[in-house]
Amino acid sequence: MTAHAIAEVARTRRLLVALDFDGTLAPLVDEPMTARALPEARTAVARLAALPDTVVAFVSGRSLADLRVIAEHDDASPVWLSGSHGAEHWRPGSEGASSLDAPAGAADLIADAEAAVADVAGAWIERKSFGFGLHTRLADDAAASAAARAVDALVAERAPGWRRRTGRDVVEFAWRHEGKDTAIAALRAETGATGVVFAGDDVTDEDALRSLGEGDLGVRVGDGETAAQVRVADPGALALLLDEIADAREAEVDAREA
Ligand SMILES: O=P(O)(O)OC[C@H]1O[C@H](O[C@H]2O[C@H](CO)[C@@H](O)[C@H](O)[C@H]2O)[C@H](O)[C@@H](O)[C@@H]1O
């Protein structure tokens, strides 16, 4: 099944390989800014991005600026970026500036969320381009629930229109409502892709996976319900799969040029 699906998508005229970052290219870690893609994932991404009619994009919930740091991404990179779940973009040759115009009261709300969890062991607030995330990876279950209740109550009262998303030991709140489906639609249109590979590990990645169509390939990394056709165990297994896609795509390019 997997080999057949890879062979099919690799034959498409113009291929977009869109990849979630945390938990997909990079193993999850306790301190978010220390996350890095596995070396073998970096190698596979570089192989794919160097091929003709093949575009690689990272589609992440991270703020764009943070994504560029952890992905060790610079202005010379051929890798396209969608950050903040599709609300921020960087394209090759662009400046990648985002308009962050926060709604009234956002700064006070985020400061109050920080104060609300300051004494909860293992809980902390990540400030993001369009809101914030409550992290509880290092909290026990009771503390994590208490922190979520406190923050949920604040947002319900002061910003009921903000989008709430759950992830791996994180609850995020954002005044922008784009999802990874939006990111895939924009990337598909801008790249002229005729086939898309998307891989992700988390609930938010399912927005992208559900948006895929005929001729595309969805990959779920790890456990959990999914709309993906293919599942791999972890980022190491995903790196191997990306290498297989690169092999198949190279063969396709060679055949076209012969
Ligand atoms: O869409 P992604 O690229 O998967 O980003 C989703 C969130 O990733 C980060 O949090 C997650 O990874 C951290 C580092 O491994 C981990 O400590 C945390 O428990 C995970 O939830 C990031 O901090 C969030 O802003 C992203 O939205």
Image: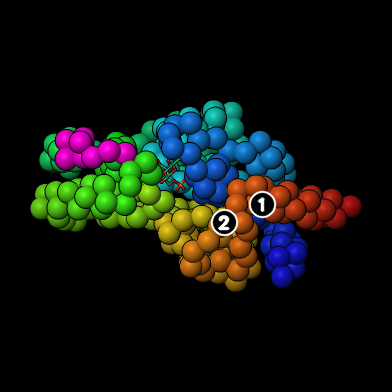
Residue drawn at point x = 65 percent, y = 42 percent: 41
Indicate the secondary structure of the residue bearing disc 1.
Answer: helix
Ligand 1: quadrant of the figure = top left
Q: Which residues are magenta?
A: 114-122
Residue 139 seen in the figure: yes
| Foreground pick, 73 / 31 | 31
Residue 188: percent from the left, percent from the top? 53, 56
Left/right placement of residue 48 relative to residue 170 reads right
Against 212, residue 198 (above or below) is above
Left/right placement of residue 11 relative to residue 140 reads right
Against 228, residue 166 (above or below) is above
Residue drawn at point x = 48 percent, y = 67 percent: 225
Q: Quadrant of the N terminus?
A: bottom right
Left/right placement of residue 132 relative to residue 210 reads left
* Residue 221 disc label: 2
Q: Earlier in the sequence, mark 1 or mark 2?
A: 2
Three-letter amino acid code of the residue under disc 1: Ala
Residue drawn at point x = 33 percent, y = 43 percent: 139
Residue drawn at point x = 16 percent, y = 40 percent: 116
| Foreground pick, 22 / 213 | 22
Q: Tell me the residue that label 1 is attached to.
A: 237
| Foreground pick, 72 / 100 | 72
Q: Is residue 115 magenta?
A: yes
**How many residues crowd mark 2 within 10 Å: few (<14), some (14–19), many (20+)?**
many
Q: Are marks 1 and 2 in contact (CB under 8 Å)?
A: yes
